[in-house]
Amino acid sequence: MNIELRGISKRFGSVQANRNISLDIRASEVLGLLGENGAGKSTLMNVLSGLYQPDSGDILIDGTPVRFDGPGDSIAAGIGMVHQHFMLVPVFSVVENVILGVEPTGSADFLDLAAARDQVQAINARYGMDVPSDVLIEDLPVGIQQRVEILKVLFRSADVLILDEPTAVLTPQEVEAFFGIVRALRDAGKAIVFITHKLHEIIEIADKVSVLRQGEIVGGGVPSEFSEADLAEMMVGRPVSFSVGRGTATPGEDVLDLRDVTLVDASLEVRLHQIAMSVRAGEIVGIAGVQGNGQTELVEAITGLAPVASGQVMFAGTDITASSVRQRHCMGIAHIPEDRQKSGMVSAFTVAENMVLNSYYDDSVARGVQIDWHRAEEQAAAACLKFDVRTPSVFLDAGGLSGGNQQKMVVARELERGVRLVVASQPTRGVDVGSIEFIHKQLVACRDAGNAVLIISSELDEILDLSDRIYVMYEGQITAEFDNSSSQADRGAIGLAMAGANRTAAA
Amino acid sequence: MADQTQMDPARLAASQPVANVTDWRRIISGFTLVMLAAIVLFLLDAPWDSVSTFRISRPRDTWAVGNLVVPSQLINTLAAIILAFLGTRLFLRGGGRWTGLSLGVGLIILAMAFLVWATAGKAISLTGMLQATVVRAVPIALAALGGILCERVAVINIAIEGMLLAGAFAGALFGSLMGGWAGIICAMLTGGVFGLLLAVLVITYRVDQIIAGVVINLFVLGLTSYVSSQVFAEFRWLNKATPFRAFKIPVLGDIPLIGPVLFNQNLFVYGALIMVTLSTYYLFYTRMGLRARAVGEHPRAADTLGIDVIKTRYAHVIAAGMVAGFGGAWFTLGSVGRFDENMTFGRGFIGLAAMIFGRWHPLGALAAALVFGFADSLQQKLSILNTPIPSEFLSMAPYIATIVVVAGLVGRARPPAAIGKAYTKD
Amino acid sequence: MTRSSDTHGSPRNDGNQHNGSSHDGGNAVDSLRALLAPTIDTRGNLREIILIPLAAVFMALLIGALIMMATSVEPHIILRSFVAMADGSVGSLNAISETLTASIPLVLAGLGIGLAFRAGLFNIGAEGQMVVGGLMAAVVSFSVTGLPMALHLPLVLVSGLLVGGLYAAIAGFLRAATGAHEVISTIMLNLISIRLLDYLLRQPFIQKEGRSDPISKAVLETAELPRLLSFIDPNLRLHFGLFLMLGAVILIYWLLYRSKLGFAFRISGENPDAARYAGIRAGLTIVIAMAIAGGLAGLAGAAQVTGVLGRATPGFTAGIGFDAIAVALLGRSHPVGILLAGVLFGALEAGGRQMQVDAGVSIDMISIIQALIIIFVAAPLLVKRIMPFLFADRPKEDADHG
């Protein structure tokens, strides 16, 4: 089955998300769709999967124009989408998730789970995916959850598969296995759209590439004809260097020192198991690992958001295990949260208010029990200039800023206070390339000023670019440590550690 | 996204002492049970030689069974011991998944102890009590069912109280005008209309679900009070419906104890049991039920699979209104046939507590409703038995129980994940 | 809803909002000045803030008239009832006095509910908090004797405030400690307070001597809130509570928008996660916010007992605690908005009484109108759809708010 998009345009309010986009999607071919965050990739695919209706333009299937009024139409036409954020119901079993929307039924609308299970197992076997049928999704690792997403699409006998940033949550080894499945699907005659912002993946897997920038197609062709630098320039619109150019580190004394920290969550499950690690003054330490292996909990233990069950958290020689979040703030621990909109800012507050979100109580802005808003606003304006937060006024709601500017606002707020340790969790997630460069520079500058910096990122490239030292986390443990100061650490070795290869060695 | 990685159980066992976070749920529920034990032991004491007599059959029943006679003080001492055990266990170790069961058993034992104490040296009809329990559980169970239908598609339904009241009102009015059956149908339709109103407000206009619910309650209270003082006061025949009488199911109704309790009741009891059964089948064994639950857990996922989130929510909220309307008609057509201002008196909210207690499952909610119904009928019996406890305190009991249940269970029982959030596409 | 990150169908974050920043050109001082210049972008918003409540009131009155027609009230009676409503609320000095008197407890309790709202809590329990606060005030007002007014009256008011605050703090504590939703627990506490009131009013130390029905002793003269207009006419009921009300408006405004505690409340209300990350102790914030809310409701009860009723009786709160919810919603949880909304509802209350006397229409009609006003205010999109012409000249607004 071939699909042709002709002149698709879509706008949201004042934002033109897609402008006059034309694409060719062919059977037995992997089409790479490259573009940075916010370039309009997801909007385009949501149009194709029927979730959005285009303002203008046509979708042609094998030459016949079609119209999708909802995801149901697109599914019926044989298009299946695997979303970046999995569309799985965590408390449903694999079978229930796979059949949802196309359930086999008996009389009285009775759900025929037995028949469904057989059908799912048949597909499972055909593509060698090895997914259990009756386990709840929430009990499965993300790699398997992704296979469930693909099963879902295949169960609907889709001929076109759209994969939206599918490798974001996988280890390098899992990525290889996943590419194997993609190739098998292509060879079985499926058309595949592979959306990513990672250049090397395009070069490895795509048969053809189209590059999207600010809602428009700006180029494309056969990937082997381009270098990574060409593709990067096309994607961003100017030459970019992805390496930060950081000098050698001159580490000092331990600023942060975790001693056998164990953390247990509310449902009594062990989330961190005897973590021992340190971050020294003047160095950047990176935490690599597949999302959900205890990184969030590690940050919570360091910042005081969650109590630890045993072990000690030492900060500059003092035991802060029992200190509150605020006490730790005041001692000089800065925290850039992994999800800025969820926990890093208040969208309905002004930029100025957001800038004092965790300093409003101290003498820099408060007088007695009262907040000196004039002072707060002046400080906010100065910080906006210094950290390149682009807003016409500090009195506008922070929710209206772009993702990059919101993130720079959070970074500004955290780094402007006198800090000694910066805990930066996913510091550049969902941010444009310009802001990424800026934030990276700020973090390196922070290191060069003699502070300790801890970076947690699921983007291995980011960890490799920034860190002087790298720890790998797997299932709540530190399973490996790599030196990354003079020469880059071995990507493959890190990947193996991320997949749990040397878990016993470290445990 | 669920990205919890399961930890190796072996390592879990080997790990250090568990987090020292104060678990208030555990403390509150454990403490309450221990306090109840103390109350039973010290306040509900009867002479050691007194007995409590519970009549089971009436003399002219087909199959008569003898009376149940128990030694009052012995039973209550035992009850206190069990309560103290459950409470201490909860207090010290935490109940985990058993918290709900412990609380439920505790409440039932407390109610029994009260009953035994109040009947010490007297006699009371056990069958009558249980019959009243079932009857009084009906509006609570139906309110809970209405709550479940809504919350399973992620709409909070605080308006259930108003829907009950509207159903009670419509039942009385149309029941007086056109007879009982028409009254029930109109009560359900009225409930459905308010379900539709809630749906329009929270689904289409994305009003905060709790605000919308509260406002609908205020509106229904105002409207029914207005009509009842403006119209019913003058035209009394509009508020004088013939209530449904109990009808005995042949043979089954003659079984001792069970017969009168389950098979010699009015339409509302049978209706509630049927609705609970049907909705259990619907939610957990049918295609549409699976889709509905998906909408409540992960609406966007459902949407991407071509399930119409908006329509599903509308349908369930309206259906919930109809169930609640039926439950509301119980107050008028199921008992006295007359509507009084604010006659539902918080039953809808107790129904929501029963829903939480029953973990968003119709059968669980029914069980919880029976516990509340028992407390309700107990209060009535106790005031007849002339106990020294002020009636105001007895009537507070279900409300206090509701608070304890909600405080002890929220967070343990997991509501549908998308609860309270309006659905938008982008 | 899944939260949308940038890559996930959220084209709004494309980087071209709020553009036109002048960071690059000009010197730093100019840029700073530009960032700090007051924005005027809020004018359209302001119009909406005024227009929507007005439209809501209009539509509520209209539907109220329709309901009256449906219950076979003659058209001329409907007309007369609206005239009576206006007459009873603003038609004379006495009417204005009644309006303001009725608005005092509404505003006080409404401020509490609004404050709790700002902190992310829905306090349905103002009614119960008024009951316990008012009852406590009554007890202190007749059982403490021999104090001068300057001491007795404040003591009475503060005891009402404290008890109301403590009662609300129960719900706050349960929420903070166990996660029990405050909506359910405050509703239950309301129902409990009613039974408690009935019980206590029969106790010998509270019940009026020689009575068998539940009614408390009378408030001593030294604990009465003085009437303000008695020099004009001793029957004008407006009392000193007016100043309590205005003082509370100013205090709550300061608390919410100038104080550290209020900022912590607002962060917790808008984004509890961000509050936690900012080191704000969620549990404590919840308990304090509930206690303040309950304290204001308790004060409302105390003011009602000592300023208007002179004693506690069953149902003396008369649903004011529920109407106050509506006042807080209508006032958008802003102290000034609550003041205006409270006066409007006070006027409806006073007008409603007149309507009942003059036109024989049940005062319950007022509850209907109040509920309708809130429905419309809570659903601005609905108002815009029904009355598009009011908002017509603002073409692109809200198109992308979904």
Image (cartoon, coloured by chain):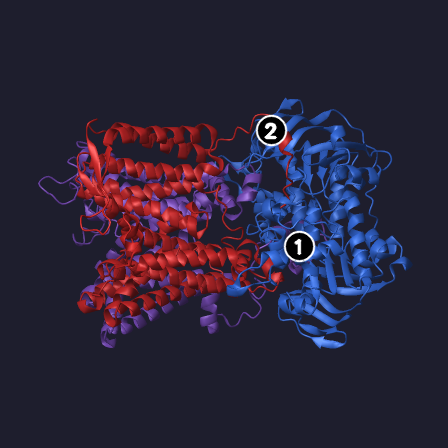
Front disc: 2 or 1: 2
Residue B250, horizontal then vertical, whole percent: 29, 59
Chain ID of residue with mark 1: A
Residue B360, horizontal then vertical, whole percent: 46, 50
Task: Using the image, tell me which numbered label, if any, was put on residue A402.
Answer: 1
A38 or B98: nearer the viewer: B98
Q: Residue furthest left?
A: C210
Residue at position x 62%, y 71% in the image: A69
The reply to whether residue C297 is in sight is no
> Given the image, on which type of amino acid does mark 2 rest?
Ala
What chain is the purple one?
C
Task: Using the image, tell me which numbered label, if any, was put on residue B13.
Answer: 2
Q: Are marks 2 and 1 in contact (CB under 8 Å)?
A: no
> Given the image, on which type of amino acid does mark 1 rest?
Ser
Task: Using the image, tell me which numbered label, if any, was put on residue A260.
Answer: none
Chain B's shade in the image? red
